[in-house]
Each structure stands twice: as structure tokens, then as C-alpha cells.
Image: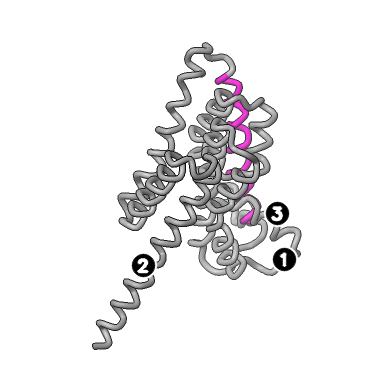
Amino acid sequence: MADLALGKESSPFRRGVQAGISIGIGYFPIALTFGLLAKTTGLTIYETVLMSMIVFAGASQYISLSLIAYGTGIIEIILTTFIVNIRHFLMSATLNEKAEEDRLPNKLAYSFMITDETFSVAATQEGKISTGFLFGLNLVAYSSWVVFSGVGHLIGASLPQTLQESMGVALYAMFVGLLVPSMKRSMKIVFLAALGAVFNTIFTMGELMAQGWSIVTATLLSAILVEAVEVLKNRHRGVSDEE
């Protein structure tokens, strides 16, 4: 506002930072909780911060913690987080059409930092989006997540051992908190979650495969079945409309 009062226009980077502040504040409690749970799962502060720096995906990092707690292998963890984050291909492709032309390294850098929240803010901007705006927007969110992940781990280290061990329950509470709002918005999500749970239970209880692979397989099967039903439903609806 001060810049406008002086008749000066804020730089794209500064506008991006301003747009990202609310996202950074919103990440504060979630990143803090992640760091705390990472401590109780057995990760060091360096591993916790490094995961936030390299992965930078809240839901995937929480899932990774649960898989690590189960003793799941690295390949299963990578595949599971890949499936969860596959939507980022679509978000990046969409922003590529809206962003200004720039060098590939710059595009790769800000694409890495895209999240659901920063994508929503960027996608609703009018006209072309500048590289400076995207860097400002994403850097605030990225910095908040990484820093508060480390802070959460430090706080977790200062808690009594009994309380640290009991914090494992919070991991399941976080999954419920992430899932329920989506289930309220779409019955498709309800069926997807239910099918995934059923498949995973069958694979695990029947000892058909290891815990990590059962999660990956259950996720893929439920997604394929739900999408197949959706396609068939739309095709049937299209035929009915023609008649």
C-alpha cells in the first residue's frame, strides 16, 4: 500500500511474497505437527528438515511417517508418495500455460515448490503470471514449511518420553482431518477411501503382501475402479441424453 501511495508499483516478487504470507501462516501449525511427529517416529532433526526440503508435500510426508513407523521399504514409500502427488503434473502443466516464458531452470525451480495452496492463488491471478510472482509466492510457503518442521522437531525433543510416544495417535487424527473435508465435498472420495481401506485390509489380513506394497496396490486398484465406474456412468448418461 505504501508503494501505491507513493505512485510506485510493487515488484512481481514482492506481490508474490504478499500473496504467500497467508499460506505461510497456514502452514505453521501443520509443519509444526509434522516435525513433532517426525521426532516421535524416530527421525533426526536433520532428516526431518531434509525431508521437508526435498519432498515438500504435507500429505505425502505424513504418509511417509506412517510407512516408516511400519518399517516399510524405500521403494514402497517412493511409489506411495508418487501416487499421492501425481496431481502435481496437472497443476504444473496448467501453470505452464499461464506463466510467462522463461528459462527452463527457472520453471523447474518454481514448479518444484508448487503446492495445492500456491497453485490456487497463482491460477486465480488475472493474465499472465510473472516468474518473480511465482518465486515470491512459493518461497514464502516453502520457507515456512521447512523452518517450522525443524521447530516442531525441537519442541518434540523437549517433551517427556511418554508424551512423545503417545503422539503417534495424532498421526491418525491428522489423516482423519485431511480426509473428512474432502469426503464432505465429494462422494467419489468416500468410495475411494472405503475401497482403499477394504483392499488394504484384505491384502494385510490375508498376508498376501507386505504392508507397504498393500497400500500402494490398494490405492491403485481403488483409483482405477472408481474412475472406471465414473467413465461408465458418464457414458451411460451421454447415451440417455441422446435418446
Mark 1, residue position = 102
Q: Is residue 80 magenta?
A: no
Q: Can residue 243 be seen in the rendering of this structure? A: yes
Numbered badge on residue 171: none
Q: Is residue 122 above or below residue 234?
A: above
| The residue stretch that appears in magenta | 133-156
Q: Is residue 21 visible?
A: no
Q: Residue 236 placed where, x, y %?
A: 30, 77
Residue, disc 2: 230
Instruction: State the predominant SS element of the stretch in magenta.
Output: helix
Say which amino acid is labelled 2. Answer: Glu
| Neighbour tally class for label 1: few under 14, some 14-19, many 20 plus, Cα within 10 Å | few
Give the percent coordinates (x, y) of residue 42: 61, 24
Q: Earlier in the sequence, mark 3 or mark 2?
A: 3
Q: How many marks?
A: 3
Q: Secondary structure at mark 2?
A: helix
- Distance of mark 3 from mark 2, alpha carbons? 35 Å
Residue found 61% across the figure and 54% down from its top: 10
In percent of width and height, residue 232 lies at 35, 72
**Between marks 1 and 3, how big is the CA–CA gap?**
11 Å
Which amino acid, by three-letter code, is at mark 1? Asp
Which of 225/106 is in front?
A: 225
- Determine the secondary structure under disc 1: loop
The residue wearing badge 3 is 109
Q: Quadrant of the C terminus?
A: bottom left
